[in-house]
Image (tube, rainbow, N blue to C red):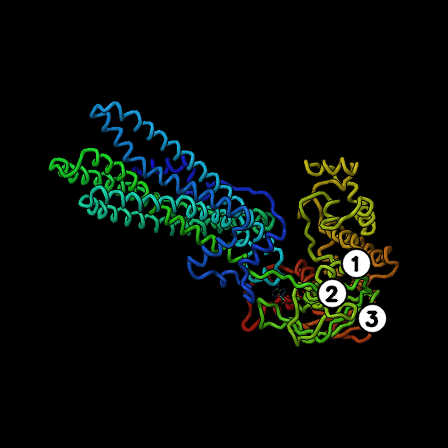
Amino acid sequence: MELPALHCRARQRGWPLPASPAARRPCESRPRPRHRTAALCAAVAVPGARYRVEERRPRSRAQLVGQLLRLLQGRDILWLVLGSAGLLLSSLAELASPPLAAGALFAAVQGQREVLLPRCLAVAAVALLSGAAEGLRNFAFNMLRSRLVAHVRRSAFFVLMAQELSFFDEVDAAELTSRLSSDCMSVYSYLSDVLSFFLRAGAVTVFSSLALLRISSSITWRVLLLLALLLGCAEWYGQVTRSTGRRTQDALAELGRVSSESLQLLRTVRALGAEDLHRRLFRRQNDAISKTQRQRGVALGVFSATSNGLGVMLQAVTLLVGGGLVLGGSMTGEALATYLLYLDTLVDSALELGIEWSSCNDALGSAERVLGILQTPMVRERGRSPGASRGDVCFDSVHFAYPSRPKRQVLKGVSLKCCAGETTALVGFSGSGKSSLISLLLRFYDLKEGHGSVKFDDVDVQQLDRSWLRCQLGVVAQNPRLFRGTVAENIAWGWPATRKEVHAAAEAALAAEFIEQLPEEWDTKSSVRRVQWNSVEGYDTVCSDEKLLSGGQRQRIALARALLRDPTVLLLDEPTSALDPKSSALVSQALEQAQWSEGRQCRRTMIIVAHDLRLGAVQRADKIVVMGRGEILEQGRHAELLELDGSYRRPQPSSARLEVRTKRCDPRVLTGPLAKGQTKTQRFFLA
Ligand SMILES: Nc1ncnc2c1ncn2[C@@H]1O[C@H](COP(=O)(O)OP(=O)(O)OP(=O)(O)O)[C@@H](O)[C@H]1O
């Protein structure tokens, strides 16, 4: 059968085709209970495994199939049994049909009216049975696939969400996103190919070969020789499909990365005048995809020509040898007709088998990657949740290196006590480890044993429940990010709050005034909220990251977010960086106001990371800690440090000051050639 006809037939039957994995149908399934997801993850988890996803790939195909089958539970088994029953019935019906059809044909040729009708009825009955069995097979396997893919995708997402931040330092988030979307779909095609289509084609190939051997072994060995050639050809085509498919997937992933980065950072791209560079990068990947598609097209052309030629040759050889046997009287005409019909079935199924073998291997690769995610151990440990907290923070001889750069010591024996209700300002050179201290307190990273400890209310943070700990700590990051949603939703993100509480938090963060003046833009989702909350204010304006709001406004929304949770400790990482003096003054005022907790009727502990030493909150801090190269250089109150006449009084030029100087001097001096032995810094100061 011709390849396009084969594809067309496959499409009619709802089988997936190897050339267009992307076009395969998406699948949905009913949500399942949580414990099921945990069970799925546990089923494939390898205890004690390292973080890298690739390192834990299963070694053999059998292991992989075993792992996929272990994902089947409960009702999945029922769908599997039903699908297999349909598969068996449809294969048997396909095998029963050639002798019945040949019998009916010969009854008509020989004028045997009395047997013609029953034979035709038998052909019709087998066709009906085959149709029903096909329907059952497709329906049951489709149900199975969609349920399983939804489980796998959800489990993979939950596993990723449960990872520590250090996991994402080591793997590419874009790659993980691609695995979640495209590879989960490929698991779907894997199941579709192997369980439904591939097994059926395999069964029909074996049974029809046996039937051919039974009818005439002398024709069959010649046929099988030619068939081996045909299978070799299909295997070659499969290899080409596999390698071009893999290259296309890689190029598509890169194309997605380039295009999303270009569009997300369009402002920066424009400001740098780098549009041409981005066009070139995009074109390179796009051309790579076209090239692999062209190679695939050539291979398809060669394969269809060869397979059609070999198919015709098979029939010619059968007619030649079989015709001789019929003329010699050692074979009946009916047997030859049955043989030809079986041959057609065999060629069809053998070609399908050859083609699907390759797409099955492709999908197996994807399944492997997805299972790699599922094998990543989740952080499950539950620590203590002591109830109320005071807000004492203590860093005790902390030595720390990021897991992705284990040789670079970021903190070298830092000891620091931040008493409850006091404000501590961490100042110092860029890269000296200030934000790393905050990350350790938040348990974004854990200290290794013997590398000191971080204590919250005199308890090592590693013994505390992460969620409880993070509820006690309110964070305003250096560059706060907003989610797509209304301003009110953004303030209450992940926290059950009433509208009144959202307003109070916005007021405490001095954000209420600008929020109320925001334009009212609605989308369907927020208009639901509008009815619920009966509100028509700027709080329902839809915003998203870096859209609509300025840096200072986003920082105040982040402060409102933190205050809504009424934490005992406020962690502020560069709260006024990149703000103009007016916004900076507003945020400073908001911070001063934010230190008093109305709910707890006490002062919060505040830890401020700052470059701007003029910030009121820094100068008024109970303790100012000056850091340099992972160590504490000096600490004390503002006046004490000024008196000390050390790093605090005469800091190295910070990035902000560098910026001011850069604006004043001739840019050519900064970009011109360096004198012999001169560093860029020396050139800058000379300028
Ligand atoms: N996720 C990470 N993985 C590896 N290294 C990191 C990571 N985050 C920060 N670092 C490195 O740790 C060092 C300290 O960084 P940190 O952000 O703590 O400094 P900082 O004092 O807060 O700097 P800045 O004032 O510029 O924000 C830097 O050398 C930085 O390159």
Q: Residue furthest right?
A: 601
Q: Residues within 10 Å of mark 3 (few under 14, many from 20)?
A: some
Q: Which residue is mark 2?
A: 384
- Sequence order check: which comes first, mark 2 or mark 1? 2
Residue type, numbered disc 3: Arg
Q: Which residue is mark 3?
A: 637
In percent of width and height, residue 89 lies at: 39, 40
Ligand 1 shown in quarter: bottom right
Foreground tag (3 vs 2): 2
Separation of residues labelled 3 and 2 (CA atoms): 35 Å
Residue type, numbered disc 1: Pro
Q: Which residue is mark 1?
A: 567
Q: Is residue 436 left or right of residue 306?
A: right
In percent of width and height, residue 71 lies at: 52, 53
Q: Residues within 10 Å of mark 1 (few under 14, many from 20)?
A: many
* Label 1 residue SS: loop
Foreground tag (3 vs 1): 1
